[in-house]
Image (tube, helix red, strand yellow):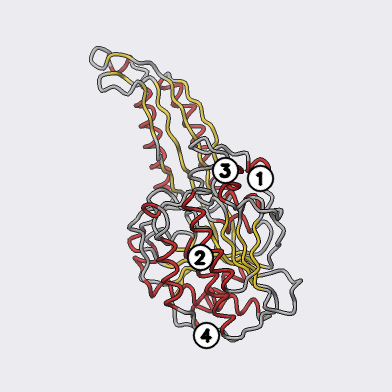
Amino acid sequence: MEFTNKVSINTERLLNRIKELGGIGMKGTRLAASDADKEGRDKLVNWMREAGLDVEIDRIGNVFGIWYGTKNKNEAPILLGSHIDTVINAGRYDGCYGVLSGLEVINTLQETSFVPNRPIAVVAFTNEEGVRYQPDMMGSLVYVGGLSVDDALKTVGTDNTILGQELERIGYAGTKEPGFLKPHAYIELHIEQGPILDKMGIPIGAVENLQGISWQRITIEGSANHAGTTPTHMRRDAGLAAARVITKLRERANASCERTVATVGTIEFKPNAVNVIPSNATFTVDLRNPNEQELQEEEQELANYLKELSASEEVYIKSEQLVRFSPVTFDKTIVKLVEQVASGRGLPSIRMTSGAGHDAEMMTSICPAAMIFVPSIDGISHNPKECTKDTDLVSGAHVLLDVVMNLAGK
């Protein structure tokens, strides 16, 4: 099969759309089902309609633009996309790049008179970030049947709003049942959100798997006492116990040769006074590993250590599971195709593991799926300083274009 493609996207159109969508929302923030999210959705839908796409919205608010540019309209479509909701004080590329590149691929194919053998569609999934409503990746999770749409719509946000009511308010409570469109394949183009491609000087990542994620909230209860008069060997110090857990996690991660990453991202002491031994420490643990067995081993090692620590420090420890996603392996044929078309464009690539969760993770349960990464400068993401070179953005869109042309040309 020929993997050299001379068809080019409209660079100016893609980059201008990324800039325009990125400018919506104060400091780039477009929380799911917010007014800023509505403005971004309206902009995207307008671009879809300008391209002559059939726009469909399902009950969880996922937005689809479908191009039936083929006689085989009943064939399962190739689905491209990501999300356009953001974290607080966001960058302009996370999620948006994949959606707008998917739209640009369709625009380009329309303009080159390419006739696909199956429909091609682009999707913006609802609430991928999970900042206002949890869980994250909600739109795609509901879409594949991992969460009831009725339960999801009842979700109460951090601001005490209800998701279903907010989708109604902004005009994006659709009528299609989630899952109405079963894809032939799903491809998600995304910035890496990490430093590997940038530091290696490689423009394309062929993502072959995605790490499993285990989130826990751990609560340690000790005894508050005077910081000056209580001998250390007589203390039931919840703060010290928390510190030992954090240190243990780093030791385990280091021993795994970077297979495991472990993060304590939040921590709170009570009574939180400078001269009082903490009676309570509550913190979160984020464990990730691309291998399910290894992730389970790390979870068990943590559980065993908490039991030992409870006895040795005379504290009570409780652990609550917050999130648990198993590792995902992407479709080997599509991953190889990404490498081949990148080579055809003269673009070096490497196979990669995604350390972050993405909608593609959910889509693997209903169709072959894969991801394409482009570099993030200094690995910065979820931050206004998030940046990818224009040349890398264009390269990634060209690889996506070529992958789609190969898949849709069969």
- Which three-letter amino acid code belongs to the residue tagged 1? Leu
- Numbered label attached to residue 98: 2
Q: Residue 189, how many percent across, how many down?
A: 51, 66
219 vs 143, nearest the viewer = 143
Binning the other alpha carbons within 10 Å of mark 1 as few (below 14), some (14 to 19) or many (20 upward) gives some
> With 16 as the anchor, is 319 left or right in this view?
right
Q: Quadrant of the N terminus?
A: bottom right
Which residue has dot 4 on it?
A: 7
Label 1 element class: loop
**Amino acid at circle 4:** Val
Q: Secondary structure at mark 2?
A: helix
58 or 341, which lies in front? 58
Residue located at (59% from left, 86% from top): 2
Which residue is labeled 3 in the image?
Answer: 324
Going from N to C along the chain, the mark reached first, 4 or 2, is 4
91 versus 308 height, above or below: below
Work out which residue is located at the far left of the displayed protein and give it.
Answer: 228
